[in-house]
Image: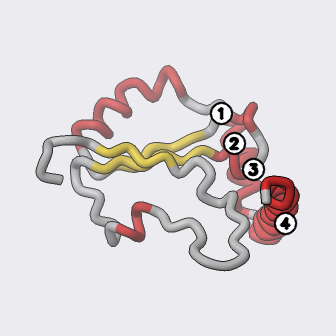
Amino acid sequence: RGHDMHVIVDEIYALSTHKKTGHGFESVMRVLDNKLGNDVHMLWAFSKDFGASGFRIGTIYSQNEMLMDAMGNISIFTAVSHPMQALAADMMNDDAFVDTFLDEARLRLRKSYDICTSVLD
């Protein structure tokens, strides 16, 4: 942090883990105890974890007020449509759906991982 550099952390696959043993995903938010400061910024997108690339819904989280002000100024040109926001909100508010979907996605990811690594071993 003493080098006047900013770090952009891409957590786009944050929920797409297949932890069997060892460590799972750890967010920068947890690592830094929610104290990102002005020089660490986090990205996440709905599309990768939920297999919905056409949704084009993502977020940037930053504690840098200048950056967030600048993002607010351009967000009018990149806003997600209201119908898409409503659909995504309905999906995310359905805890049973989210849990079932992510469990199945992790299971399939694990199977794919096992197949690939067995061929490489």
Residue kind at label 3, given as amino acid type? Phe
Q: Is residue 89 left or right of residue 109?
A: left
Residue 71, by quadrant, is: top left
Residue position marked by numbered label 4 in the rendering: 107
Residue 51, by quadrant, is: top right
Residue position marked by numbered label 3 in the rendering: 50
Colour mapping? secondary structure
Q: CA distance from mark 4 to mark 1?
A: 25 Å
Residue position marked by numbered label 1 in the rendering: 56
What is the crowding at mark 2: few (fewer than 14 residues within 10 Å), some, or many (at least 20)? some
Q: Earlier in the sequence, mark 4 or mark 1?
A: 1
Q: Mark 2–mark 3 contact, CB under 8 Å?
A: yes
Residue 115 coordinates in the image, percent (x, y): 87, 58
Q: Mark 2–mark 1 contact, CB under 8 Å?
A: yes
Residue position marked by numbered label 2 in the rendering: 47
> Is 43 placed above or below 97 here?
above
Camera-nearest residue between 24 and 94: 24
